[in-house]
């Protein structure tokens, strides 16, 4: 097939242009370090790379969320620890106060310390985190949760708990509602609570009691009446007598699946109560302790009442500390989950970056080899064109 | 003697003409479209004598150009195809480059918006986190609008290109017609092919085939009739039809292509142009540009509807229900310029999941209404009757026809085209971001059982007053409960969600008789982040294409599609380039000038001329000899 002069030049030029274009593209890839300059270079890879970039950005956000959750939970843990130590101190004071040989001065100094401790407890419950949000207010984080009204403390927050996103499908709660932490603590032994009437004249004390047979227990307001210093009868809420018995000091009185122990010397018509457990907040518990301490304690009856009340206070403080411990272990578990989440996020990011690199990054060795081959090809095309285009029959005529 | 004198003179004249042709070829070695010319030499009729026929020398029959019609046709067909793909590919690359930046693209912007939502969820009372969210929302809207604007600009460039192409085509057809005239006259005068005129006309035909696909029919008088690929006449003899742009009957900013017939009637040929750069531009406009803008619009609509619906389900820092965060452009409806009735249909988007990227044409047939796909013309079925009470429902749209419409009226409906230009962020006050849920749940402190109630979520925000009113769930016994304000009792299934006034909650555990749970208003719950988390979740929920594609997926899929179509266009173009080049090479092999060949021919004819001239000298000396022989003295 013959070739025209114009055709020869055109073809050679087209080849050189094509080689230059390919060379320019390789150079662009090397300069940017990326194999994919535009989506057309690798459509599937480009779409995958976009998705991986997005997942990376999302994972970094999860890191930030984890830090926010960790901070808030750490603050909560500190507050719970401080509240626990405070309650321990109050318990020690209650134990010390329960000594009948204590004089009035000692009692007053215990009372003033307990008052300070109560205020401290309210302050702990009203603590805020670094963002100015209250720790124990539920969703109402800008509302102070606990307000003191005389001797009562009211809760002004709500029951909400906030969750933060710490992984693609992982959410962690960042706190507890103040009502759960400080307010709704079961009274007594969880099933019933005992008490002594203020009108008692004898020196009898009643302990917290225990449940023997849960199925036989019928929640009701029971009263144990002493018909004589040695006999008693048990009445239920409708004043129906359901049991009677002989009293021996330290002996147990059992009825409807429970048993309580009465000690000391009760008089006739002394009354002891057994009521179903409600909930009591820990501020009320400490306030009750203050009320007990404020009463003078001279007669046998007053001493006995004081002993019963201190016994209940100590039991109730134990309940509160148990609640704080439970919550603390929940917080500890969450912090542990968060610390694992940090590791998971780091692993995930490394994984994603590796995938991204495989898709998008240029293999420099391959690219530079290609560059050299293309350079050689271009040079050869140019030189051969120069040589051949100089050949012309007219040169020899 | 006179015989071989005149014979050599014929030789001289013939070789002179041959050298003329050779020098013409050499001079035109670089002229595009030039076909090399050859002088055809034939022997003159010989004279018969008793002792043989005697040759009378050589004649120039014609100067012929070396040209193959069939090969040229092949080149033109390949050129049409190649131009079409080249234009398509070039325009496609522009869109491709638009999406090439991986850090400022749609997907990263959407993720930044999602991250800003998470930051608000971490700390809902923090004003600067909320401010950042508003900035990111603006950034996202900006990014979408900027893509749309650049696509719109590409659209304007295409309109300009179409206009330019059409005027170029008209110029070419007029030139071809004029050449037809000249060639016919030249043939009539000399009965010889006017080679250079023929070359010029072929050049014009080649140029024309690069603009649109054509077919040619040779006429006996040397003229060529030119038709479009689908058979419409462009040039018939000396007459050229005018190719003009007309404004689209629906959209004055768009151009269509029409042919003006001899009587002045316009016939639209936009859909029938299939090759050439004009065909490429038109195909790109309807196959890529319009659907891509519509897809961007659909993403904008889905973003707005999804985020707004969730935002309206929450409450802001002051306790007010959330209002719309984004605003998006509405459905574009255009009436045809030929409509005789008044009014436009009222078209609303009712179901984002069912929206497509197509445009539609609604036509009043007199006996009813027909909806067609604007690009393909295929009919699309609708349900309903088109009235206000019973609108047509189709592909996520509800259409109410205009009262003043007449038979034959047509309307263009573009569901998502104008959505992105109207995209905007409506909230600028950080405290108006609705991060909290409107209600909260609680269990009564006096409950004796172990039942717990979930935090709950909003499933129906259409009645905020009911949603935020207080409802109490009271357990009659361990397996039955009542809801305040609702008649009847319900059986308790632990963990089973149920809806109260638009709030979905669930109770688990073992509640005892008399236990109560409350759903109440959440004003003051400023640290609640439930709605912020729900907003972040909504970005990965399926909201497009019948719930199969989320916003995140839609944005990265758009980039992948653009890349894939571009790659395919490039590959087709490269393949067609080779076909075109081979056809051109074949033509060139026949018609192209080779200087070496011309040099050899030059030597050949030069020597022949010299030999013929030598013959004259011989004739002259023979004559002298004869004279000398017959003279006396």
Image: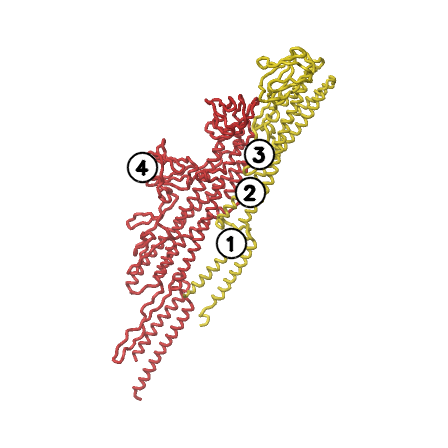
Tell me the residue that label 4 is attached to.
Answer: B368
Query: Image quadrant of residue A217?
Result: top right
Of the numbered discs 3 and 1, the one sitting upstream in the chain is: 1
Disc 1 element? helix
Q: Nearer the viewer, mark 1 or mark 2?
A: 2
Q: Nearer the viewer, residue B380 or A261?
A: A261
Q: CA distance from mark 4 to mark 3?
A: 59 Å
Q: Position of residue B551 (x, y in %)?
A: 48, 39
Q: Nearer the viewer, residue A106 or B532?
A: A106
Q: Position of residue A307 (x, y in %)?
A: 69, 18
Residue B465 appears in the rendering? no
Q: Residue at x 38, y 61 (%)?
A: B33
Residue A56, disc = 2
Disc 4 element? loop
Q: CA distance from mark 4 to mark 2?
A: 54 Å
Q: Nearer the viewer, mark 1 or mark 4?
A: 4
Tell me the residue that label 1 is attached to.
Answer: A25
Q: CA distance from mark 1 to mark 4?
A: 57 Å
Q: Vertically, is B120 above or below B200?
A: above
Horizontal relation, residue A169 to residue B283: left or right:
right
Q: Nearer the viewer, residue B581 or B572?
A: B572
Tell me the residue that label 3 is attached to.
Answer: A172
User: Color of chain B here?
Assistant: red
Report if the CB atoms under discs 3 and 1 are less than 8 Å apart: no
Q: CA distance from mark 1 to mark 2?
A: 29 Å
| Host chain of mark 4 | B
Q: CA distance from mark 2 to mark 3?
A: 20 Å
Of the numbered discs 1 and 2, the one sitting upstream in the chain is: 1
| Host chain of mark 3 | A
């Amino acid at each position: 097939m013959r070739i025209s002069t114009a055709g020869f030049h055109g073809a050679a030029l087209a080849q050189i242009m094509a080689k230059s274009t390919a060379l320019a593209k390789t150079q662009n890839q090397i300069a940017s370090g990326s194999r994919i300059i535009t989506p057309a270079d690798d459509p599937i890879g480009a779409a995958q790379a976009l998705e991986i970039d997005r997942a990376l950005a999302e994972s970094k956000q999860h890191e930030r969320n984890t830090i926010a959750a960790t901070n808030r939970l750490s603050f909560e843990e500190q507050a719970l620890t401080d509240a626990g130590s405070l309650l321990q101190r109050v318990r020690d004071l209650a134990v010390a106060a329960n000594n009948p040989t204590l004089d009035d001065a000692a009692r007053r100094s215990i009372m003033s310390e307990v008052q300070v401790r109560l205020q401290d407890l309210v302050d702990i419950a009203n603590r805020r985190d670094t963002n100015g949000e209250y720790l124990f207010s539920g969703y109402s984080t800008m509302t102070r949760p606990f307000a003191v009204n005389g001797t009562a403390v009211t809760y002004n927050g709500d029951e909400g708990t906030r969750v933060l996103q710490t992984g693609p499908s992982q959410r962690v709660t960042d706190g507890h509602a103040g009502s759960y932490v400080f307010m709704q603590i079961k009274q007594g032994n969880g099933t019933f609570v005992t008490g002594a009437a203020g009108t008692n004249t004898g020196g009898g004390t009643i302990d917290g009691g225990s449940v023997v047979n849960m199925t036989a227990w019928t929640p009701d307001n029971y009263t144990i009446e002493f018909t004589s210093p040695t006999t008693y009868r048990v009445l239920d809420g409708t004043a129906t007598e359901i049991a009677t018995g002989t009293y021996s000091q330290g002996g147990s009185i059992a009825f409807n699946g429970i048993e309580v122990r009465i000690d000391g010397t009760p008089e006739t018509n002394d009354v002891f109560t057994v009521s179903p457990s409600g909930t009591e907040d820990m501020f009320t518990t400490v306030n009750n302790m203050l009320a007990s301490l404020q009463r003078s304690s001279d007669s046998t009856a007053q001493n006995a009442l004081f002993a019963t009340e201190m016994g209940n206070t100590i039991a109730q403080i134990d309940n509160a500390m148990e609640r704080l411990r439970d919550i603390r272990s929940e917080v500890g578990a969450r912090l542990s989950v968060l610390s694992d989440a940090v590791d998971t996020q780091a692993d995930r990011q490394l994984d994603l970056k590796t995938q991204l690199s495989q898709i998008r990054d240029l293999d420099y060795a391959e690219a530079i080899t290609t560059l050299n081959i293309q350079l050689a090809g271009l040079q050869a095309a140019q030189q051969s064109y120069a040589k051949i285009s100089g050949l012309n029959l007219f040169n020899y005529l | 003697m006179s015989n071989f004198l005149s014979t050599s003179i014929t030789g001289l004249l013939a070789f002179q003409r041959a050298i003329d042709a050779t020098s013409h070829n050499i001079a035109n070695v670089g002229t595009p479209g030039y076909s090399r010319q050859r002088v055809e030499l034939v022997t003159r009729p010989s004279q018969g004598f008793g002792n043989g026929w005697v040759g009378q020398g050589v004649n120039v029959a014609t100067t012929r150009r070396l040209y193959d019609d069939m090969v040229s046709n092949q080149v033109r067909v390949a050129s049409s195809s190649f131009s079409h793909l080249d234009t398509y590919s070039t325009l496609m690359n522009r869109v491709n480059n638009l999406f090439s930046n991986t850090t400022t693209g749609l997907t990263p912007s959407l993720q930044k918006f999602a991250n800003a939502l998470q930051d608000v969820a971490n700390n809902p009372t923090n004003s600067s986190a909320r401010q950042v969210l508003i900035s990111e929302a603006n950034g996202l809207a900006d990014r979408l609008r900027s893509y749309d604007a650049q696509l719109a600009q590409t659209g304007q460039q295409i309109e300009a290109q179409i206009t330019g192409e059409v005027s170029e085509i008209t110029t070419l057809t007029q030139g071809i017609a004029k050449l037809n005239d000249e060639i016919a006259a030249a043939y009539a005068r000399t009965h010889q092919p006017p080679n250079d005129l023929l070359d010029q006309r072929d050049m014009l035909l080649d140029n024309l085939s690069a603009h649109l696909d054509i077919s040619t029919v040779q006429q006996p008088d040397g003229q060529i009739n030119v038709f479009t690929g689908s058979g419409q006449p462009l040039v018939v003899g000396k007459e050229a039809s005018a190719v003009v742009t007309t404004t689209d009957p629906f959209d004055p900013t768009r151009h269509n292509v029409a042919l003006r017939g001899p009587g002045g009637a316009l016939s639209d040929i936009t859909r029938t142009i299939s090759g050439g750069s004009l065909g490429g531009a038109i195909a790109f406009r309807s196959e890529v540009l319009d659907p891509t803008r519509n897809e961007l619009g659909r993403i904008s609509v889905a973003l707005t509807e999804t985020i707004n619906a969730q935002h309206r389900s929450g409450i802001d820092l002051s306790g007010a229900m959330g209002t719309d965060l984004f605003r998006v452009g509405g459905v574009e409806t255009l009436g045809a310029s030929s409509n005789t009735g008044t009014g436009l249909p009222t078209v609303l988007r009712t179901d984002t999941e069912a929206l497509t990227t197509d445009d539609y044409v609604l036509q009043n047939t007199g006996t009813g209404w027909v909806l067609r796909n604007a690009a393909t013309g295929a009919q699309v079925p609708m349900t309903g009757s088109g009235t206000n009470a019973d609108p047509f429902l189709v592909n996520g749209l509800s259409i109410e026809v205009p009262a003043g419409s007449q038979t034959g009226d047509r309307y263009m409906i573009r569901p998502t085209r104008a959505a992105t230009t109207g995209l905007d962020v409506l909230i600028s006050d950080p405290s108006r971001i609705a991060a909290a849920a409107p209600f909260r749940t609680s269990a009564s402190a006096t409950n004796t059982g172990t039942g717990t109630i979930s935090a709950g979520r909003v499933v129906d925000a259409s009645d905020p007053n009911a949603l935020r009113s207080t409802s109490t769930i009271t357990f009659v016994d361990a397996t039955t409960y009542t809801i305040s304000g609702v008649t009847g009792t319900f059986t308790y299934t632990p963990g089973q969600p149920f809806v109260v006034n638009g709030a979905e909650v669930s109770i688990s555990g073992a509640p005892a008789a008399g236990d109560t749970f409350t759903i109440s208003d959440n004003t003051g719950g400023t640290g609640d982040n439930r709605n912020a988390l729900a907003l972040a979740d909504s970005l990965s929920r399926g909201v497009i294409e019948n719930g199969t594609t989320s916003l995140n997926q839609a944005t990265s899929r758009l980039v992948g599609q653009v890349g894939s179509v571009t790659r395919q266009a490039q590959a087709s173009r490269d393949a067609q380039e080779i076909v075109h080049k081979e056809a051109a090479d074949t033509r060139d092999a026949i018609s192209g000038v080779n200087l070496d060949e011309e040099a050899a021919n030059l030597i050949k004819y030069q020597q022949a001329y010299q030999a013929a001239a030598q013959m004259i000298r011989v004739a002259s000396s023979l004559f002298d000899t004869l004279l000398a022989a017959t003279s006396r003295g």
